[in-house]
Amino acid sequence: MQVRSEILTPAEVAVLETFVVPRYLSAFGAVALDMMLVGEGANVVHLGCRTGYPDRQLLQKVPSCHVVGVDSSVHAIELARNKAATLASGGLEYVLTEGYPTHLPPGAFSHALTLHPIGTAYERTQLFSEMMRLVYSEGQVLVSMPLRGSFQELGDLLREFALKYDQGEFSQAVELAMASRPSIETLSEELESVGLEDVDVEVVSTELTFAGGRAFIEDPTTRLLIIPELQTTLGSFDLSLPMSYVCDAVDGYFAESDFSLSVKIGCASARRP
């Protein structure tokens, strides 16, 4: 599995760290940290770590733990390493990888973590298999990601575009994209399918607000995570015209108020038998 964050440019990595982490990814990380049963001397692998959030927060929670972050983006790993170098205590290590499985040894970690993985159901299975491989018996796996029901407002506007311009195939693709996002049940089934047990999913509902259509289209969270996540299911469809329609529609429908996008965060905890 090729890790999709590998296409991030240096500028996008900086924007991700400065804007996307505090505005969006922090909500996924907070739920995962709350569910993580971590003690002294824990050894944690963070797959798809990007710029290293929430690794520093994990060290603040348990100073004696060790975290190994894995990502395919050269620029994201470089920033994560630079941040780690400012810590006097150490405890953070970052490894560049081309995909899964990694070269890390099996059964070497007490915990495996991933936030907002972008990919198809098949790619998620590869990721979950690697998480299963890396933790030892009774090790904890944590996956925090948007569940089915997230971004429905965007889906509604894309379906409206398809209806207005008689784009039947695009409408079907949007329906599939909305339905393909995991539910509580399907996320549990995907984790169990790779051999994990004792799956528990906690759900937190939140929203993102935008001051108009242009603000929504240009927001770093939209550009770097929401649209790429949607594009994995839409495949070859060009989103230029649909997103232009969305921009105008938001300005028209929400001229007197902010545009709110619902996010249903699901954090799954599982254990290797």
Image (spheres, rainbow, N blue to C red):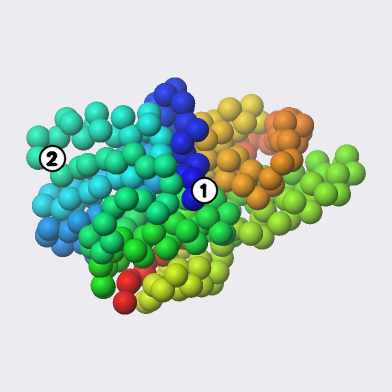
Residue placed under numbered mark 1 in the picture? 118
Q: Quadrant of residue 259?
A: top right
Where does residue 126 sit, x and y in percent of width and height? 47, 58
From the top left corner, tell me how far across and down residue 98 is, in percent: 42, 42
For residue 165, the mark is none
Q: Quadrant of the C terminus?
A: bottom left
Image position of 177 (left or right of 105) = right
Q: On the image, numbered disc 2 is attached to which residue?
A: 90
Question: Viewer-proximal residue, 85 or 206?
Answer: 85
At x 18% / y 31%, what residue is drawn? 85
Q: Is residue 220 above or below residue 155?
A: above
Amino acid found under the numbered disc labelled 1: Ile
Give above or below for 64 relative to 224.
below
Q: CA distance from mark 1 to mark 2?
A: 29 Å
Under mark 2, the amino acid is Gly
Please report whichever mark, 1 or 2, sits nearer to the chain's N-terminal start: 2
Any part of residue 206 in sight: no
Point out residue 187 in the picture as x, y percentages from the top left corner: 51, 66
Q: Secondary structure at mark 2?
A: loop
